[in-house]
Image: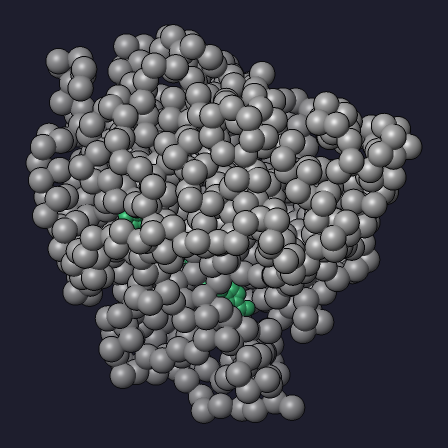
Amino acid sequence: MTFPPEAPLFPPASRARRQFLQVSAASLAMVGLSAPFPAMAQADLPPLEDYAPEFFTPGEWAFVLAAVARLIPSEGAGPGAIEARVPVFIDRQLDGNFGQASDWYMAGPHQADAAPEFGWQTPLSPAEVYRAAIPVFDDWCRDTLGAPFAGLETEAQDEALTRLEAEEVPLAPEIRDFFKILLANTKEGYFSDPIHGGNHGMAAWVHIGFPGARAHYLDWVGQHNVRYPLGPVSISGERA
Amino acid sequence: MARTDAKKDVVIVGLGWTGAIMGMELAQEGLEILALERGPNRETVPEMRYPNMIDELSQGERHNMMLRPAQSTVTIRRNLNETALPMRKWGSFLLGNGVGGSGVHWNGQNWRPQPIEMQLRSHIRDTWGEEIIPEDMTIGDYPVTYDELEPYFDRFERVAGITGAAGNINGEVQEGGNPFEGWRSGDYPMPPLPVTYNGIKFAEAARAMGYHPFLRPGGNASTSYVNEYGMQMGACNFCGFCERYGCYQYSKSSPQTTILAALFRKPNFSYRTGAEVLRVEMAADGQTATGVTYFDEEAGEEVFQPADIVILAAYQIENVRLMLLSGIGTPYDPVSGQGVTGKNYGYQITGSTSMFFRDEHFNPFIGSGINGVCIDDFGMSANDFGALGFIGGAYISSAQTNGQPIRSMPLPQDTPAWGAEWKSGIAEWYGHQMSIGHHGSVMSYRGHYCDLDPTYRDRHGRPLMRITFDWHPNELRMNAYLKEKIEEIARSMQPDVMQSSYKDYNSRYDVRPYQTTHNTGGTIMGATPETGAVNRYLQAWDKHNVFVTGAGAFVQNTQYNPTGLVGGLAYWAVDAIRRQYLRNPGPLA
Ligand SMILES: Cc1cc2nc3c(=O)[nH]c(=O)nc-3n(C[C@H](O)[C@H](O)[C@H](O)COP(=O)(O)OP(=O)(O)OC[C@H]3O[C@@H](n4cnc5c(N)ncnc54)[C@H](O)[C@@H]3O)c2cc1C
Ligand code: SF4
């Protein structure tokens, strides 16, 4: 710590930390946490090709596999969305509460073309937005670039996504946020705990240095400008 | 088909922070009390247990602890001419639900207001003259002073187990604390927590510029602690999953850790979950309430619950709505300026500067809800409103509360949002960034208010509450000033990359990004029935057995997170009920 010497600014860190160690240990014991994480093997999952989507039709599935592979590509260091099994995550999300918007206020009247600052105003649920937007975007890809999205070369796919992001693909107000939703769900699937189907092997956490569900750093608060050395753990007890 | 249950002495609507306080204090009088909570039951174990709680997708992104908008939400418009639209999914703020309310998943940043914020109009009049107050700014004086509330702030801090370093004890400035804070009768109940690297870097830079850094006070325990109700807390371990999460290890100040288990042991207190209160019922003479009607989720029917005293502790938004639905106080009319219920809706303004240091390690996942260093050199009492051209103030801080990667992945702005460069960017920059932000006051205005929406309804057919709010030039001028000050500090730290995110003069209120759940006003306190919906004891002016807690009482919002004042006001009001009202029920003012 490089405090100006005249600074009794903060309390003696040592005292605070000592108390802190004692008490925290006690409270951990209280919730039965003193046992170490079980070193569980990464569950063997069927390869992505063999996954049977719950929500997506085969055509939609082909689109999602192709699109997330460009949003987070496999090349370079770190997993791509495919290795992270992001499509599985999205499929499961769209099949559940999120996809059906069952927690949201969906009563009308709807004003889908409201100013964006009003947030979600389409009458469609996220699952319905995917269902409605994928064919529109595929048609646009066919008309403009010569093939549906999944059939394009990667450069053309990147161009198509870039133009979708830039709102150059005409979309009805009800589905105008399709790209934003797809990108947000892709990143959620990449970074969320593996129990949700993505972030396979916690490889995305390893890639950035996020320790996942460790959630216990009392020894590390005062270790300034030192890289935290431990790899992630997940909710179900895997380590990486 | 309505059922009628046996009469209680007191019915409390909502079992969050203030419902728990009112329940505990009144239970000590031996009264028969029933609290009605619309959400589910919640205890540290099992509901907040490790590791299931540590799930960013479920809590951070999908808001599983919050009220489901499908059950109830608000509509928003920016001015009287717009059509308000419902907040269909949460964004700008998140409404708590279930036992403990938002006290379960707040960050715990706990502040008192500055004394001048309580008597703001008089302070401005005496210092600069009232002519500097913009014509449409409806600020006033709270009908209670900081000095009167001090013992009650202290009480709340002791019950909640707040950590911090005093800056002013009985008027004497203390080293290491906030020299701009109002006087305190004693130190904080617990010493401050240590702080992460970003805080130390900010403190050094701020100090070098002549500012007065101090550790943020708040409700994350630094040691073992037992409060007056016999409730125990243990030290926070910087789990990095505080805001939006329940604390898995009894360290965050919450109704659960500081009040509820003790309260539930009292035979004269009971509570129901899945009990959404629909309205307050009135006696034929219109002078008092007779109880409340609620929807019993389990039985699937409406229930009339008679009671001698009704306490609305349902958070600012639902408190205003219940008052409007039940005819308590005259609804505010923004055109004539007449009426009080719904008046002076306020919020908080924020902005921040991000700094990237390629070769330094911040370990952003190490954080507590309050972790950070603050300065109050641009707060209310330090600002010369006359010279600066705005009325307001803010504290500036460098926080590190969570580095959860779905929501906390700041990247230099030339990094693409997807593709190969995004993927390499996240590995290059995660953990090498810190920020400095401000948290500022928002004044009250004639056109910012709450009323009942004419179109949208909840599942019971009740109108949703409509909020009319936008950024006002006064706050945007303050924001521009703070940006300049923060960027000056940030530049002095010589980051590799620095970028700012502040509103500009064209910014409109945007419901999408989370900002704060610091909604204020609408059930404002006033010295007269013409100026407030409740009196100085949070008692409805026109229904003496109805009391209304929460930040709805704020005449104008302060520059700080609200709960220190919310908790202080609850203890102040319940003290008046205990000492005066129970002996002699009737208007207290
Ligand atoms: C994510 C988040 C972070 C926050 N961080 C901070 C912070 O760091 N510092 C700070 O000062 N403040 C913070 N706050 C605000 C703080 O939580 C509130 O100020 C405080 O909880 C208010 O207390 P209350 O009793 O008024 O409401 P709450 O604690 O919200 O309790 C209200 C209760 O009433 C219930 N209820 C509502 N309507 C009904 C009805 N019709 N019938 C029955 N029950 C009903 C609700 O379900 C809820 O349980 C935060 C809030 C949120 C959501
Ligand atoms: S940061 Fe501390 S107080 Fe907050 S949830 Fe984690 S352990 Fe509890």
Q: Is residue A38 visible?
A: yes
Q: Residue B76 at what x, y percent from top left?
A: 69, 48
Q: Residue B483 at what x, y percent from top left?
A: 50, 18
Q: Residue at 49% of width from left, 34% of height from top?
A: A79
Residue B539 position (above or below residue B349): below
Find residue B174 and report its image quarter.
top left
Quarter of the render that holds ligand 1: bottom left
Q: Residue B396 at what x, y percent from top left?
A: 40, 26
B85 or B229: nearer the eye? B85
- What quarter of the picture does the C terminus of chain A occupy? top left
Find residue B359 and report its image quarter.
top left
Q: Is residue A170 left or right of residue B536?
A: right
- What quarter of the picture does the N terminus of chain A occupy? top left
A106 or A208: nearer the eye? A208
A187 or B107: nearer the eye? A187
Q: Residue at 35% of width from left, 60% of height from top?
A: B48
Q: Residue at 47% of width from left, 25% of height from top?
A: A77
Residue B494 position (above or below residue A148): above
Q: Residue at 51% of width from left, 71% of height from top?
A: B38
Q: Residue B456 at what x, y percent from top left?
A: 74, 61
B171 or B397: nearer the eye? B397
Residue B280 position (above or below residue B388): below
The colour scheme applied to this rendered structure is one colour
Please give the count of numbered marks on the rendered protein. 0
Q: Is residue B240 visible?
A: no
Q: Is residue A83 left or right of residue A69?
A: left
